[in-house]
């Protein structure tokens, strides 16, 4: 009977890995148990291969393709249209003329979406590394965007660069403060951050709605019938480095987001703070025994996560929105997509970049403005994006299921080939 | 005692887990009326083999013969029906039910079709326990009886199901010396009645005491099967480990200096808020190993946690070199010079997903030269880790290897390296050899004695009396959260065992 190692869903073989030498099952002291499905999953995830997220994505696209097929369209054409709608064809050197201009325009929009997705993705990822699940990116983003807007509306006499710095800092701190509340609650009374951040989301939504809504203190008094903020001071608009400022070109917020990916990675890998955060995330008991303040790190990790989300709000308002309306406050989904970004990106900087790019391209590529309506109705396409997003989250969470099915398949195959010899029944 | 026909034969059993050959063509035969010990280090494949026999795993190849007939079990139920009973290390009993109810569970005698025949069950259990000398009251609830009695209930369960082969997995691990002696008496009585016993253990002395024959496993292979008459601890240890092992701890005489670690009238509560330490006082002086002997759950955990800063005592004082540190957190205790080898290295000792280098700098990452102004200096951290890996003979990985990839013994070496490298004044070692194999135990013991000889104060908390007696310069017996007596290392097992079970609460509690 030939033995092969477990396989990743992608089919890539895994070396019979560095399992501890004591693999005796039902062990005396709960040493490493026999390779259970969970242990293998943990091993796979640690092996950190990019194969799993890629396989997950491909699977999600395949199922999405089936849905397209059912609606009577050609999946390949639809995906190509989404690809072009996202402007990714700009990277092909053979695209010329007006097609290239359109591609550039589309890609700039994808870039604008990429900025907050990277940052809200980091907001989830950083907390994850400390063993916390930050569901509150939405609230932190809203607090950030409201604060950033109002600081950019006020202080019109400040020089532009100082004003921009002030608005961005205020929004970032506001996000940190908002998430820090959940962090303190977790650190002191043990309130679970999932519950408290969800509650804080609602508080942020309704406080924000009040502030810029009808009769609110920050509402634009020149148009009482519209629930929007005053427009921000023009010299706080972030400089656009690619495309036209009038047509929503890509602003320098892009570089800030990329810079934050570097910061994220450096903080985690190269600072004592990151060392503590990771130690607490992996094993809070051992961290505490080693003299690391677990509560302190819960607070700090939440605050830093919130800072990323607050920054996302500032860059959106200073980059292209320029004034905040209540609809944005109440309906923004950006931070929830950020959860999917972090999950798919496996909480790494590089992974977060690519998964943010994937979701930015999907969302932008299926928007009614960018998708070729003769190929696929954009109204349906938006749903396709959500289907793919949902499937990705489901599969990332359901690796264990995939592995289980894989094992089952192996088992059945064995039964068939060698019915008389005993089979692996584990 | 044993006749020639084997009741059970395992032939060429092979079992492979991904990356590991757990059993490699293992042959084993069990004669009627025999106690056959299965001896081996952790990870040698003992439990895998028994799980195959008990129908929990299937072998990749090989065959099992019961009374000369081929059998193939697909579940534990099949094994039970074929007359094989197993007593696991962790008992499978329901605490709120009575002894009789636990014994008959699953095959309850019924009256009138639906009603449990409690009287009948109790009578049957009483009859069995009298016949085999398994003293236990069938009407007591399992949660009220001692661990030793609970083990008898497990044996009764097997007997009730008409087992004639009994497998015991590390049965003495949870027992006091007296209870172990009682168990051996019971096992001998069972073999008189024609039962056969497979006795899994990694303790050399008890295997020699109880077994008729001994099969030694190493890395999934049978090294030898020998009659216990003629075998010695040294010969068995050599077979188990594959090299000569120093079983006795070599310990030069010592003259203890001043007290480095002291507790005075220490009270502490457990996680449920119940007081488990009732005024403990003692001191550990420079250059001595003080052993705390006790049965699990008598306040040792709370004592250790209070000493290393993980638990705030409710009253009393903790002193390090005369300086009061009561109620300080772990970081303070580390800085005050208290090293800690925790009871559970996976939970408290290591961050398994961290590299060896990161684990080795788990205390020092925040100080120069490992870091400066909040920035880690990976090169220094790696260099230091490489030095410690060499110095402490940590095998199975390099500085960047994840700690989880190491064997238990090498993981423990990482913990010891980190704690000793911090050159503490006092070292608190809680069950430092738990789950380790003979070779690693030898290593840990040697390191502890070295620390003592370097004029450190070492507090050893262990459930293994052998370990306490061979390492300690003084022994304190703990019972129900109180120190009930002080003994020299020459104290007999019986004497200590009695104190540990509250048999003799010494009036003079000296420290």
Image: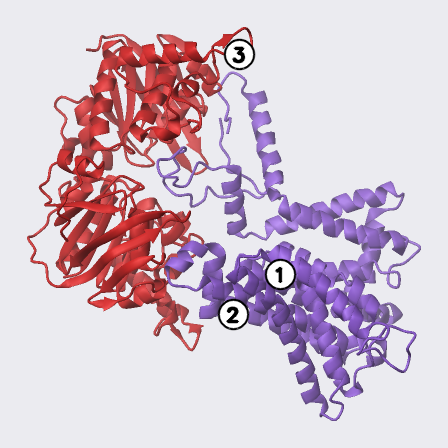
Chain colours: A purple, B red
Q: Which residue is mark 2?
A: A267
How far apart in space, not on screen, are marks 2 and 3 (Cα)?
67 Å
Residue A250, by quadrant, is bottom right
**Which mark, by number, is residue A124?**
1
Q: Earlier in the sequence, mark 2 or mark 1?
A: 1
How far apart in space, not on screen, are marks 3 and 1 (Cα)?
57 Å
Q: Which residue is mark 3?
A: B115
**Most foreground residue, B472 or A96:** B472
Q: Chain of mark 2?
A: A
| In the image: residue A336, left or right of residue B49 | right
Residue B84 lies, in percent from the top left, at: 38, 16
Q: Of tags 2 and 1, which is closer to the observer?
A: 1
| In the image: residue A294, left or right of residue B137 | right
Residue B135 vertical position relative to residue A30 in the rendered view, above or below: above
Residue B39 lies, in percent from the top left, at: 26, 29
Task: Please identify the residue farthest to the front as the structure is shown.
Answer: B507
Q: Residues within 10 Å of mark 3 (few under 14, many from 20)?
A: few
How far apart in space, not on screen, are marks 2 and 1 (Cα)?
15 Å
Q: Of tags 3 and 1, which is closer to the observer?
A: 3
Q: Of tags 2 and 3, which is closer to the observer?
A: 3
């Amino acid at each position: 009977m030939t033995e092969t190692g477990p396989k990743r869903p992608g089919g890539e073989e895994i070396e019979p890995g560095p399992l501890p030498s004591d693999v005796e099952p039902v062990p005396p002291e709960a040493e490493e148990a026999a390779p259970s499905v969970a242990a293998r999953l943990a091993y796979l995830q640690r092996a950190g291969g990019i194969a799993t997220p890629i396989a997950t994505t491909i699977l999600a696209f395949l199922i999405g393709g089936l849905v397209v097929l059912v609606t009577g369209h050609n999946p390949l054409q639809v995906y190509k249209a989404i690809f072009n709608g996202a402007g990714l064809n700009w990277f092909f050197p053979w695209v010329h003329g007006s097609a290239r201009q359109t591609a550039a325009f589309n890609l700039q929009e994808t870039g604008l979406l990429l900025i907050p997705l990277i940052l809200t993705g980091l907001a989830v990822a950083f907390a994850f590394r400390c063993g916390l699940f930050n569901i509150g990116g939405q609230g932190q983003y809203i607090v950030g965007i409201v604060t950033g807007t109002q600081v950019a509306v006020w202080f019109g006499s400040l020089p532009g660069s100082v004003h921009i710095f002030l608005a961005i800092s205020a929004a970032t701190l506001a996000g940190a403060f908002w998430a820090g509340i959940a962090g303190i609650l977790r650190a002191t009374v043990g309130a679970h951050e999932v519950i408290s951040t969800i509650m804080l989301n609602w508080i942020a939504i309704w406080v924000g709605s009040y502030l810029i809504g009808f009769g609110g203190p920050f509402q634009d008094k020149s148009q009482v019938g519209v629930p929007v903020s005053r427009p921000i001071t023009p010299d706080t608009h972030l400089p656009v480095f690619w495309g036209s400022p009038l047509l929503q070109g890509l602003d320098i917020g892009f570089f800030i987001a990329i810079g934050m990916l570097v910061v994220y990675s450096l903080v985690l890998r190269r600072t004592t703070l990151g060392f503590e955060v990771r130690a607490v995330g992996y094993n809070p008991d051992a961290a505490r025994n080693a003299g690391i303040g677990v509560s302190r790190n819960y607070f700090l990790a939440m605050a830093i996560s919130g800072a990323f989300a607050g920054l996302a709000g500032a860059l959106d308002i200073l980059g292209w929105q320029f004034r905040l309306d209540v609809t944005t406050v109440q309906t923004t989904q950006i931070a929830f997509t950020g959860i999917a970004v972090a999950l798919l990106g496996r909480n790494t900087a590089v992974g977060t970049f690519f998964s943010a790019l994937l979701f930015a391209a999907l969302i932008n590529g299926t928007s009614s403005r960018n998708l070729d309506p003769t190929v696929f109705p954009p109204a349906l396409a938006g749903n396709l994006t959500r289907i793919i997003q949902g499937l990705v989250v489901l599969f990332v969470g359901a690796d264990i299921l995939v592995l289980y099915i894989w094992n089952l398949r192996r088992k059945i195959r064995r039964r068939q080939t060698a019915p008389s010899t005993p089979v692996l029944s584990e | 005692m044993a006749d020639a026909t084997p009741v059970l034969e395992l032939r060429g059993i092979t079992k492979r887990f991904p990356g590991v050959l757990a059993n490699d063509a293992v042959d084993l035969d069990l004669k009627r009326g025999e106690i056959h010990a299965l001896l081996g280090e952790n990870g040698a494949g003992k439990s895998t083999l028994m799980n195959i026999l008990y129908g929990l795993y299937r072998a990749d190849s090989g065959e099992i013969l019961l009374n000369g007939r081929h059998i193939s079990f697909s579940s534990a139920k099949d094994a039970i029906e074929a007359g094989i009973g197993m007593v696991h290390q962790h008992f499978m009993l329901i605490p709120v039910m009575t002894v009789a109810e636990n014994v008959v569970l699953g095959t309850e005698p019924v009256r009138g079709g639906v009603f449990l025949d409690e009287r009948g069950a109790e009578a049957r259990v009483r009859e069995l326990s009298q016949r085999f000398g398994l003293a236990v009251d069938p009407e007591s609830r399992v949660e009220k009886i001692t661990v030793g009695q609970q083990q008898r209930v497990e044996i009764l369960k097997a007997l009730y199901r008409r087992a004639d082969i009994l497998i015991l997995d590390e049965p003495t691990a949870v027992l006091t010396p007296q209870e172990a002696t009682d168990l051996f008496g019971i096992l001998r009585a069972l073999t008189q009645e024609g039962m056969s016993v497979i006795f899994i253990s990694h303790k050399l002395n008890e295997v020699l005491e109880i077994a008729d024959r001994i099969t030694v496993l190493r890395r999934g292979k049978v090294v030898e099967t020998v009659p216990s008459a003629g075998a010695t601890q040294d010969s068995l240890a050599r077979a188990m480990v594959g090299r000569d092992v120093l079983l006795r701890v070599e310990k030069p005489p010592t003259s203890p200096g001043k007290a480095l670690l002291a507790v005075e009238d220490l009270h502490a509560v457990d996680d449920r808020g119940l007081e488990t330490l009732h005024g403990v006082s003692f001191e550990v002086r420079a250059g001595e190993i003080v052993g705390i002997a006790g049965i699990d759950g008598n306040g040792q955990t709370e004592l250790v946690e209070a000493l290393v800063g993980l638990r705030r005592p409710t009253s009393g004082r903790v002193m390090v070199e005369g300086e009061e540190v009561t109620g300080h957190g772990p970081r303070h205790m580390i800085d005050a010079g208290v090293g800690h080898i925790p009871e559970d290295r996976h939970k408290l000792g290591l961050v398994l997903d961290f590299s060896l280098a990161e684990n080795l700098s788990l205390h020092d990452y925040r100080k120069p030269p490992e870091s400066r102004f909040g920035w880690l200096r990976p090169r220094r951290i790696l260099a230091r880790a490489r030095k410690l890996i060499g110095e402490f003979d940590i095998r199975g990985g390099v500085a960047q290897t994840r700690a989880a990839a190491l064997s238990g013994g090498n993981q423990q070496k990482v913990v010891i390296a980190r704690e000793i490298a911090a050159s503490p004044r006092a070292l608190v070692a809680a069950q430092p050899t738990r789950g380790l194999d003979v070779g690693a135990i030898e290593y840990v013991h040697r390191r502890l004695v070295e620390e003592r000889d370097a004029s450190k104060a070492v507090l050893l908390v262990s459930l293994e009396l052998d370990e306490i007696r061979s390492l300690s310069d003084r022994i304190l017996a703990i019972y129900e959260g109180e120190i009930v007596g002080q003994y020299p290392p020459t104290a007999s097992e019986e004497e200590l065992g009695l104190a540990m079970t509250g048999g003799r609460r010494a009036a003079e509690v000296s420290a």
